[in-house]
Image (cartoon, rainbow, N blue to C red):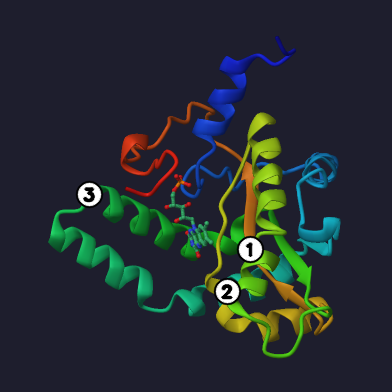
Amino acid sequence: MTNFDVRHTDTLLTTTRAVRKRLDLNRLVEEQQIIKCLEISQQAPTGSNRQGWQWVIITDKGKRRIIANYYHQGAGDYLEERKNSARDRGAEQDFKVFESAQYLADYMEDVPILVIPCIDTSHMPLNASGRKWLSLGGSIFPAIWSFQLALKARGLGSCITTLHLAYEREISKILDIPETFAQVALLPVAYTKGTNFKPANRPPVSEIIHWNSWN
Ligand SMILES: Cc1cc2nc3c(=O)[nH]c(=O)nc-3n(C[C@H](O)[C@H](O)[C@H](O)COP(=O)(O)O)c2cc1C
């Protein structure tokens, strides 16, 4: 017996979506909300218990515009092409994702808060193996997800995005991010329009589970 309300916990875990079109671009987000959610995210696991992260919060309108511009350029024709291809294949769910991703790319500068989680790479050996890079990424994504869950519990929404990374160097310069830190994602954060998010369609777990052996 635990103190958790499992129903609420499961609802939070299954309805925290990538929010794009339902970000409320007209409502201010209090700094305190971001600080609290980041505080919660700090409990996430990391390799070697390192917590080698820094989080850059961008509220400045001018900087948001520049970053959003780079994001748009990073998206280039990619989203449009993926959207059209999904439509031609009759893949409705994919079409919706890319249409919504295009919307976010078009309105990124209007999102009240942009959050860029960064991870320290200074301890990474030259020519680090893929396994080491995977482990580094695995040492920040749990915290990113915790941050998103904490936001959701407070009526806020976010979306992991990475298309700006094509211009990581330029954005780091604008934000004075040291060269030893890699940007991992760009999270637009805002209150959501409504809070009735649903679980997404996912393949049944029986297709991905292996008890004791792959076969
Ligand atoms: C590593 C990673 C990178 C992503 N990059 C982008 C991105 O650049 N732009 C975007 O709109 N969504 C991006 N997403 C969000 C996914 O498209 C989204 O999680 C997926 O479509 C499932 O939607 P759901 O989270 O609502 O279930 C990314 C997600 C992850 C985990």
Disc 3 residue type (three-letter)? Glu
Q: Which quadrant would residue 182 be assigned to in this image?
A: bottom right
Other-residue count near label 3 (Cα within 10 Å), few / some / many at <14 / 14–19 / ≥20: few
Q: Which quadrant would residue 175 be assigned to in this image?
A: bottom right
- Judge by depth and name the residue closer to the eye, 57 or 145: 145
Q: Earlier in the sequence, mark 3 or mark 2?
A: 3
- Judge by depth and name the residue closer to the eye, 127 or 110: 127
Asked whether the viewer can see residue 207, the reply is yes
Residue at 67% across, 65% down:
135
Q: Which residue position holds label 1?
A: 186
**Of helix, strand and loop, which one carries label 3?**
helix
Q: Which residue position holds label 3?
A: 92
- Asked if marks 3 and 1 touch (Cβ < 8 Å), the reply is no
Cα gap from disc 3 to disc 1, whole angstroms: 26 Å
Q: Is residue 154 left or right of residue 91?
A: right
For ligand 1, tell me if the residue under mark 2 lies within 8 Å: yes
**Of helix, strand and loop, which one carries label 1?**
loop
Disc 2 residue type (three-letter)? His
Relative to residue 115, is residue 207 depicted above or below?
above
**Of helix, strand and loop, which one carries label 2?**
helix
